[in-house]
Image (spheres, helix red, strand yellow):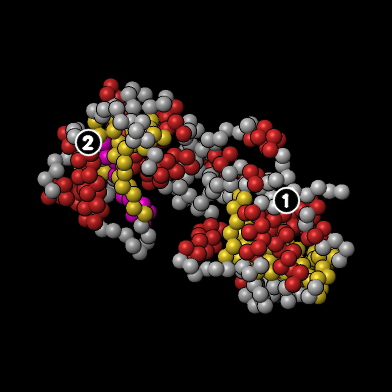
């Protein structure tokens, strides 16, 4: 007799919510059981659904059969064992299932290529199950959504492993659903996050010994085990760890001989100002505080508005650090002369005598990255714990793989992490490179 592991409360709640939800998404790390959890929910849906024709898909036909139809003994052919058969429907692979509400025909398809969308056109599907949906082609997934519009009770089920936050599936699908949910306008969206830590089929002692083989600070661990949306390849700041992060209490005895503010004007992206303190003998660099504003294409601030808000922060910092006004430098985006002028005017208007200097870029971005990496690896680079976007950027920054294959070292800048925080902090530190003796 097979001994099955029980469901956790999180898993059971997800299955329970799926009964009345149109969009069901199970995301998380490897070996989290999310595929099996979703299949149980989907089978319950098929059992009573009024429509006859349905669709399951994966990045390929083989992946769909392996992950949804078989699924290591937990797929649809096993959940409906004794009342289903494999066959074809209009020259398409299919699974026929006898249910309480009549026969169901489950079309099986691959969706990894742009032209795969043509293979599911012409039909209207009652429900859909997509495995590893964010590995499939965008045009195919969009067609899936469209092909269920006429369903008697539209229900979509997706499982996925995490991708970088900028991935199109998050940007075009889940981010908007999350936004609606926060406003209380999307009660039919059922999202569940699962990790191997909730997989009760793995004994605790075995799980503990396996997890001991991972670096807990690595992006690999965060993506595959914790199921976080990170960029897990081509990491730039490989020396980054929790030792970089400091609290106010940990630096309460630090003295700073110089302060530096680096400012990056983001256009339609984020505008960032980073306050950096440098300790005596140019030993340590500490990112102390910052200004971060993420604007949209239609909601940008003017140069004057940004200048006012950043000077507000400068006033705040001057009250926090007694010697601030006598030893502070400002290095602002060199390509934006109008902003530098606006900032200089605002400082002058408030009687603050700090010169605004164009950010130094002569040696290039790779040299700035190299400087940060060296300081991190030497244990001389610290970031205050409240600077979440800056920490996220250091943790997730990657090299652009296509550029790297072409022989160029270019930092990924696709919105998957707040890269503007890196530019801003680098502008603040780079001018002190020689004195930092790296």
Of 4 and 420, nearer the camera is 4
Q: Percent x, y for residue 102?
A: 81, 75
The quarter of the displayed image where residue 77 is located: bottom right
Of 140 and 52, nearer the camera is 52
371 vs 320, left or right, is: right
Q: Percent x, y for residue 348?
A: 13, 47
Q: Point out the stretch of residues depicted in magenta.
A: 260-271
Residue 267 drawn in magenta: yes
Q: Residue at x 68, y 66 (%)?
A: 128
Q: What secondary structure is marked by label 1?
A: loop
Q: Residue at x 37, y 43 (%)?
A: 387
Residue 265 visible to the viewer: yes
Of 56 and 22, nearer the camera is 22
Badge 1, how many Cα within 10 Å: few under 14, some, many 20+? few
Residue 131 visible to the viewer: no
Q: Residue at x 22, y 49 (%)?
A: 312
Q: What secondary structure is marked by label 2?
A: loop
Q: Quadrant of the C terminus?
A: top left
The residue identified by callout 1 is 6
Q: Percent x, y for residue 281?
A: 28, 21
209 vs 432, left or right, is: right
The residue identified by callout 2 is 321
């Amino acid at each position: 007799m097979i001994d099955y592991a029980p469901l956790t409360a999180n898993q059971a709640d997800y299955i329970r919510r799926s009964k009345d939800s149109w969009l069901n998404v199970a995301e998380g790390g490897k070996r989290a059981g999310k595929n099996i959890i979703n299949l149980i929910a989907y089978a319950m849906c098929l059992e009573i659904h009024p429509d006859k024709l349905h669709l399951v898909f994966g990045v390929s036909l083989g992946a769909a059969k392996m992950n949804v139809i078989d699924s290591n003994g937990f797929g649809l052919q096993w959940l409906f064992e004794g009342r289903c058969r494999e066959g074809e429907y209009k020259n398409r692979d299919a699974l026929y299932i006898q249910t309480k509400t009549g026969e169901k025909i489950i079309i099986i398809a691959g969706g990894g290529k742009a032209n795969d969308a043509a293979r599911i056109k012409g039909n209207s599907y009652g429900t859909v199950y997509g495995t590893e949906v964010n590995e499939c082609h965008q045009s195919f997934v969009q067609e899936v959504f469209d092909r269920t519009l006429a369903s008697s009770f539209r229900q979509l089920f997706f499982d996925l492993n995490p991708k970088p936050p900028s991935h199109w599936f998050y940007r075009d699908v889940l981010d908007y659903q999350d936004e609606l949910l926060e406003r209380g306008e999307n009660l039919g969206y059922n999202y569940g996050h699962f990790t191997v830590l909730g997989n009760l089929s793995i004994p605790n002692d075995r799980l503990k010994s396996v997890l001991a083989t991972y670096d807990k600070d690595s992006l690999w661990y965060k993506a595959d085990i914790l199921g976080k949306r990170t960029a897990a390849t081509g990491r730039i700041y490989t020396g980054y760890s929790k030792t970089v992060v400091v609290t106010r209490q940990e630096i309460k005895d630090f003295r700073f001989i110089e302060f530096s503010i680096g400012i990056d004007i983001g256009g339609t992206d984020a505008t960032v100002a980073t306050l950096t303190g440098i300790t005596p003998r140019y030993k340590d660099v500490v990112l102390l505080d910052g200004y971060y504003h993420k604007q949209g294409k239609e909601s940008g601030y003017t140069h004057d508005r940004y200048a006012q808000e950043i000077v507000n922060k400068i006033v705040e910092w001057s009250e926090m650090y007694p010697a601030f006004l006598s030893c502070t430098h400002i290095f602002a985006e060199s390509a934006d002369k109008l902003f530098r002028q606006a900032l200089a005017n605002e400082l002058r208007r408030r009687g603050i005598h700090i010169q605004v200097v164009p950010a130094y870029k002569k040696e290039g971005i790779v040299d700035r990255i190299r400087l940060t990496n060296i300081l991190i690896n030497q244990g001389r680079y610290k970031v205050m714990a409240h600077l979440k976007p800056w920490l996220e950027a250091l943790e997730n920054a990657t090299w652009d793989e296509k550029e790297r294959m072409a022989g160029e070292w270019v930092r990924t800048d696709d919105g998957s992490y707040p890269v503007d925080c890196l530019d801003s902090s680098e502008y603040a530190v780079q001018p002190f490179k020689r004195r930092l003796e790296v």
